[in-house]
Amino acid sequence: MKESCCSNTADSTEKSYEVVKIEKAKSFCSGCEDFAEGQLKNKIPYSILSCEGACLRGEVSRLVANNICFNEIPEKTSRICLGGAFTKNTGQRNLVRNAERVIALEGCSIQCASRMMKGVIDDLETEVILVDKYYDFDTNLFAINEVSEQEMKQYAKQATEKIIEKINTESKSDSGTCC
Ligand code: SF4
């Protein structure tokens, strides 16, 4: 397995926190709530979080999450809306709260998905997967437009196969080397 990107600038044993104030949602997304209710009712055991970010690594992570939840093992996994679960205490957050396993696909070692959800669910345990360790690419690249859509799909395919194997055989986080 490859090293993930970025370098570790902080003492990883020391935890510090940022306090954020999120305006409560005034609107309601029925599609999102119906989806969450259906997944809970069907006792889908794993929740999949992903970086929904704007860079190449974030986009590949997002594609892998979609592959896993909608193509490979939909009977076991719920694709979580990270923004919804983070910003409102309704169905999506409940899916995460009640999951047997919470698996966070992280685009990079910033680990935004797992850190966001830990901020709103006390004592949440997540299994962190650093997706960029699971496909071969030029690690100097950053932006989505630096590769073709075809290449991006190929990265996602390669990572999906390895990550499915990991999900099916173990429940351990990747050790982050950086950020
Ligand atoms: S958190 Fe990392 S992987 Fe996600 S968009 Fe930002 S830089 Fe990219």
Image: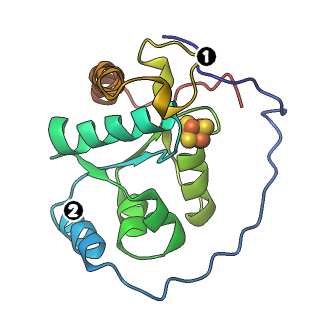
The type of colouring in the image is rainbow
Question: Which amino acid lies under the numbered mark 1 shown in the image of this protein?
Answer: Asn
For image coordinates 74% across by 23% down, the residue present is 7
Number of residues whose C-alpha sits closer than 10 Å to that of mark 2, classed few (under 14), some (14–19) or many (20 or more) = many
Which disc, if any, is residue 96? none
Which disc, if any, is residue 39? 2
- Of residue 25 and residue 143, the one placed in the foreground of this image is 143
> How many labels sit on residues?
2
**Badge 1 element:** loop
Percent from the top left, x then y, of residue 34?
Answer: 22, 74
> In the picture provided, is 40 more to the left or to the right than 104?
left
For image coordinates 42% across by 18% down, the residue present is 134
For image coordinates 29% across by 75% down, the residue present is 33
Question: Which amino acid lies under the numbered mark 2 shown in the image of this protein?
Answer: Gln
Percent from the top left, x then y, of residue 173?
Answer: 51, 31
Alpha carbon separation for disc pair 1 and 2: 39 Å
Work out whether 68 lies above or below 87: above
Residue 62 can be seen in this image: yes
- Of residue 13 and residue 18, the one placed in the foreground of this image is 18
Residue at the spot of label 1: 140
**Badge 2 element:** helix
Q: Is mark 1 within 8 Å of ligand 1?
A: no
